[in-house]
Image (cartoon, helix red, strand yellow):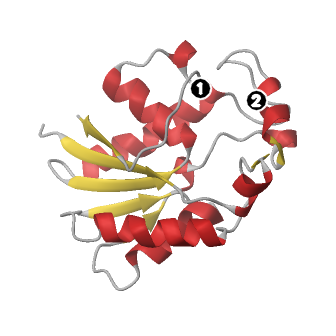
Amino acid sequence: MPQTRVVFETHSWSEDNELGVASGWNHSALSPRGRRAATALGDRRRDDGLDAVLVSDLRRAAQTAEIAFTGSSVPVLHDWRLRECNYGDLNGRPAEVVHAAVRSVHDRYPAGESWADAITRVGGALDDIVANWPGGKVLVIGHMADHWALEHRCNGLPLDAVGQSFEWQEGWDHLLT
């Protein structure tokens, strides 16, 4: 089976990001900084030979795609499986509280999911990308759960290393089979 190229971009800067809040499954709009970044993402990717854009249905990701691909013929498809980790009772709480709440990627957030659960959920969306665009090129706009799922699946990142280090960049390229 031919490999599918997946380019991952994080959603743009949200109002919650500005406040130091971990949104989780809460919807947060883009900040003015985020709207500018979404425009720049579109400038980078709109003519990148994409077959499709798949995006989380959470507002900050959906709004990033909407701004970036307005007027483009590239189809933009929403998939709830590309959501961030569900922090349960901690959705929308200060990031330091959320990050301190679990010790392992296998520990579930109260009334939420674990990072391992989130990576498995995202894996279902990745399987569908390979099935629907074999040999194609797809942009995923999403969250850290998507980033870690791609790093785990494509680069062999051990689950226990999820969340240990992250440095933002303008997109990550992955090959899926």
Q: Reading the chain from its start, which is encountered first: label 1 or label 2?
A: 2
| Figure disc tally | 2
Could you classify mark 1 by the number of other residues whose Cα lies within 10 Å: few (under 14), some (14-19), or many (20 or more)?
Answer: some
Q: Quadrant of residue 53?
A: bottom left
Q: Position of residue 102 (x, y in %)?
A: 78, 21
Q: Residue at x 38, y 50 (%)?
A: 170
Q: How far apart, in angstroms, are the residues tagged by discs 1 and 2?
A: 9 Å
Judge the density around disc 2: few (<14), some (14-19), many (≥20) Cα neighbours within 10 Å: some
The residue carrying mark 2 is: 99
Judge by depth and name the residue closer to the eye, 54 or 128. 54
Where does residue 109 sit, x and y in percent of width and height?
Answer: 79, 30
Assign a secondary structure to mark 2: helix
Q: Quadrant of the C terminus?
A: top left
| Vertical side of 63 occupied by 5: above or below | above
Residue 156 position by quadrant: top left
Looking at the image, which is closer to me, 73 or 46? Answer: 46
Q: Residue at x 81, y 41 (%)?
A: 88
Please name the residue shown 21% across and 44% down the image. 4
Q: Position of residue 89 (x, y in %)?
A: 87, 41
User: Do the residues bearing badges 1 and 2 touch, measured as CB atoms within 8 Å?
Assistant: yes
Q: Quadrant of residue 160?
A: top right
Q: Which mark is residue 163?
A: 1
Up-down: is 100 above or below 57? above
Image coordinates for residue 133, horizontal then vertical, percent: 23, 53
Q: Is residue 128 left or right of residue 133?
A: right
| Image quadrant in which the N terminus is located | top left
Q: Amino acid at mark 1?
A: Gly
Secondary structure found at label 1: loop
55 relative to 8 in the view: left or right? right
**Residue type at mark 2?**
His
